[in-house]
Amino acid sequence: MPLAATITVLRQVATRLVLPIALLYGVMVGLGLLVTKVLNDVWPLTVEDTVNRQLELERNSGANDVSLVFSTIASTPAIIAVTAVVAFTLTVTLRRWREPVFLVSAVSAQALVFLLTTLAIDRQRPAVEHMDVSPPTSSFPSGHTSAAVALYCGLAILLALHARRTSTRVAWWSLLVLIPIGVALTRMYRGMHHPSDVIGSFVNAGTCLVVMARALLDRAVRWGGEHGVVRFRPHQVE
């Protein structure tokens, strides 16, 4: 790649990716401080543990098994494996870089923001029995929920873009959005996160998806000297 194109790409990475994600990190830390330091004695945060305690009372063997499935598919090994397989499949089938890079970047960005936020925000987990083993002071935000939103909603975006029929787009969204919702409920059910933790995760991952989609899926955005590309025309499938 010519030097001028390399400089252009680096500048684009800084302005379109690094800066927005850095701002997101600041927002997440701000939200964490609001939840733990400023509004922690204000409704509805004062009743969050009530929600977790009620979910604890509703536990049974069947629901426990279902919750374990959702929790497992949003675990770090599962997220890495599914992201790698999907990205490889997209690369081979579409023979384009934008879609796989979008998905990998969205999942990676939310993970970075999540990790840095947990280092800055020291929040205790709900005062109920914890069904999983995790550090006690890494409750905000929920890493499982954030990863599930980035991966499965990111996949829904790609499949919807490549679908010809509105009904197909609706079907993909309806199916895949249920996974992060299920993960969010599961993490609260298993006593690992407060409701505000999973809400923060939707903010984190949702913002990462928007940032990456605008930078990488919009073919009007030319990277490092791309020419002749004005509009994104996805390969449509039934």
Image (tube, helix red, strand yellow):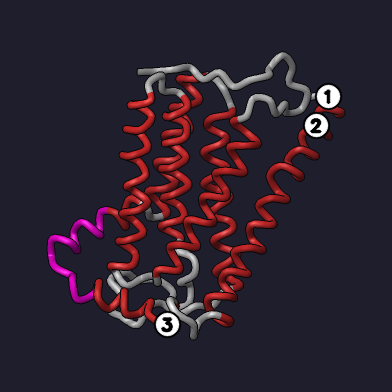
Q: Mark 2 is on which residue type?
A: Thr
Kind of residue at disc 1: Pro
**Cα distance in 3D space between marks 1 and 2:** 6 Å
* Residue that mark 2 sits on: 6
Residue at far right of view: 4
Q: Which residue reaches farthest front?
A: 43
Where residue 4 sits, quadrant-wise, is top right
Provide residue 76's location: percent of width, then percent of height: 42, 54
Residue topped by disc 3: 46
| Residue found at x 59% / y 31% | 217
Q: Secondary structure at mark 2?
A: helix
Q: Position of residue 1 (x, y in %)?
A: 78, 24
Q: What separation in Å lies between label 3 and label 1 (alpha carbons)?
A: 57 Å
Left or right: 30 with respect to 60? Answer: right
The residue at which mark 1 appears reads as 2
Q: SS of the residue at dot 3?
A: helix
Give the residues in magenta. Answer: 56-69
